[in-house]
Image (tube, rainbow, N blue to C red):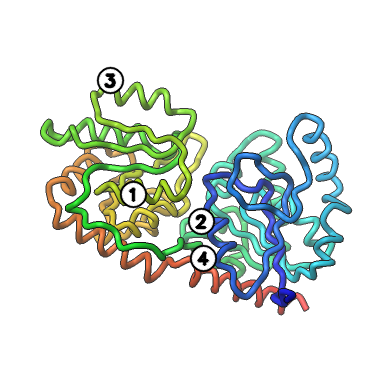
Amino acid sequence: MADARPVVAVWKSTWLPGSQTFVANQLGALRRWRPLLLGVHRLPDGLPVVPDRAPFGSGRLWRAVRRASATTGYLGVYDGLIRREGARVVHAHFGTSAVGVLPVARRLGLPLVVTFHGYDVTSEPRRTDPAGRRYRARLREVFAYADTLIAVSDHVAGLLVSLGAPEGRIRVLPIGIPTEGPEPRPLSARRGIVFVGRLVEHKGVEDLLGAVAALPADLRSVPVTIVGDGPLRPALEAAATTAALDVTWRGFVPPAEVAMALRENAIFCAPSIRSVAGDAEAFGMVYLEAALQGLPVVAYAVGGVPEAVARDVTGLLAPERDITALSGHLRTLLTNPELASALGSRGRERVRRDFDVVRRTAELEDLYASASARAR
């Protein structure tokens, strides 16, 4: 039986980096709209999401072909498929992708919805090289044409306004996470601190290790699990060894193993910071994933983190780069299991109530319908 749902053309330049499970989750939560997945190329080792068209490969020759096609607005590459499928709306993930698909949407007269996730409004617009200047100029064109600009947090919404986006077109809509699954074990049956994320500057793993090293002697033996990989891993491993910390490095693992690591530990600590380049946590889906598993959260109050972690309700927040305060929060939870359990329980309840991906995606589908109606 043919799928009679209206079609949304979902555009991601690259399908689909392993860190972007939030895009896959949102696609899986669509109920009233059918996605047509389009982009430039597909990563061979990315998430198992197969785009309907992402025709450009990698390598020097393919990069030249992509650049040449981009200068024409990808003329003749996607238009026919979008018309045949009857797409009513184009939805781009990240401003960096939106500037690429803008000529296609404009040429076909389709409304454009853009979700801004973080670096596309933090570090990318701050670049001073020619690519940064081009991005800022093209972003202004996106602001002028787009029907709806979705910010994943109030923090991102404020950054959009500062970049010149019209406030009347901005909608704050976190993506949410899947909330089904088994009830987590009580914290009393778990032990250890866990971090999940890329091992890059703005994720703050160096501060996490410093905070554990600053714990009193009777607590410094607490096991720490680091889930994720990145360029800073060798330096971080060396720092953990020098400080004689009990750290297990799990590397990059599939989403199911991430959930397992969260279920095995008692505290989640991800002290994201502002990087030198300007990167900061836009919201932090991983804080929701941790809370869903009943974990109290310890982090810095930076960027959109206070929107993902309710201060003193679902977690404890320290001032950015205050390792002493960060360590103090870890000590509080390690020595006060009743408080840790209460924060974790409230966090799980909040995620299931406010951040279920199916309910959040239903709101997105309402935005698609409104944009489609306005375009008629």
Pointers 2 and 4 in contact (C-beta within 8 Å): yes
Image location of residue 275, percent across then percent down: 46, 37
Residue annotated with mark 1: 262
As measured in the structure, the alpha-carbon distance from the residue carrying label 1 to the one carrying label 2 is 27 Å
Numbered disc 3: secondary structure: helix
> Observer-nearest residue: 7 or 374?
7
The picture quadrant where one finds residue 296 is: bottom left
> Observer-nearest residue: 157 or 102?
102
Image point (17%, 43%), residue name: 331
As measured in the structure, the alpha-carbon distance from the residue carrying label 2 to the one carrying label 4 is 8 Å
As measured in the structure, the alpha-carbon distance from the residue carrying label 2 to the one carrying label 3 is 38 Å
Q: Which mark is residue 242?
A: 3
Numbered disc 1: secondary structure: helix
Extreme residue in the front direction: 1
As measured in the structure, the alpha-carbon distance from the residue carrying label 3 to the one carrying label 1 is 26 Å
Q: Quadrant of the C terminus?
A: bottom right
Image location of residue 175, percent across then percent down: 50, 62
Q: Residues within 10 Å of mark 3 (few under 14, many from 20)?
A: few
**Is 304 situated above or below 367?**
above
Mark 2 or 4, nearer chain start? 2
Residue annotated with mark 2: 156
Q: Residues within 10 Å of mark 4 (few under 14, many from 20)?
A: some
As measured in the structure, the alpha-carbon distance from the residue carrying label 4 to the one carrying label 3 is 44 Å
Image location of residue 358, percent across then percent down: 50, 69
> Observer-nearest residue: 257 or 153?
257
Name the amino acid type tagged 4: Val
Residue annotated with mark 4: 172
Mark 1 or 2, nearer chain start? 2
Image point (31%, 67%), residue name: 349
As measured in the structure, the alpha-carbon distance from the residue carrying label 1 to the one carrying label 4 is 28 Å
Numbered disc 2: secondary structure: helix
